[in-house]
Amino acid sequence: MPNYLATAAALFVVVLFAVAVLAMTVGNYAAAGVLFFSASIVIYFREKRLVGE
């Protein structure tokens, strides 16, 4: 059975990375840093809580 919540979290990480890269291209490095850090937290949460062993 597919884990829809884990898949949604992975898609959210992709969106966060895309927005972070966009923020970097316009020179907003603070926002890009926060977005990259947020993506890291979502990845950690997904691997620890959403993906079963």
Image (cartoon, grey):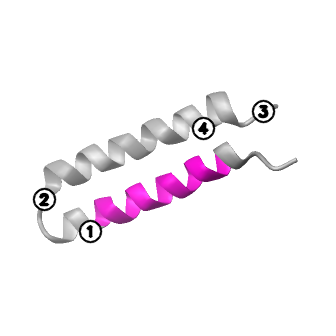
Q: Is residue 17 left or right of residue 35?
A: right
Quadrant, the C terminus: top right
Distance from the alpha carbon under mark 3 to that under mark 2: 37 Å
Quick one: SS at disc 3? loop
Counting residues from the N terminus, which is met first, the one under dot 2 or under dot 1?
1
Residue at 72% x, 37% y: name it: 51
Q: Write the start and end of the magenta stretch as one range.
A: 6-21
Residue at 37% x, 41% y: name it: 38
Distance from the alpha carbon under mark 2 to that under mark 1: 9 Å
Quick one: SS at disc 1? helix
Counting residues from the N terminus, which is met first, the one under dot 3 or under dot 1?
1
- Residue 37 found in image quarter: top left
Residue 46 is marked as 4
Residue type at mark 1: give it. Leu
Residue type at mark 3: give it. Gly
Query: Is residue 51 within the magenta segment?
Result: no
Quick one: SS at disc 2? loop
Q: Is residue 3 left or right of residue 13?
A: right
Residue at 78% x, 32% y: name it: 52
**In x, y percent, where is residue 23?**
21, 63
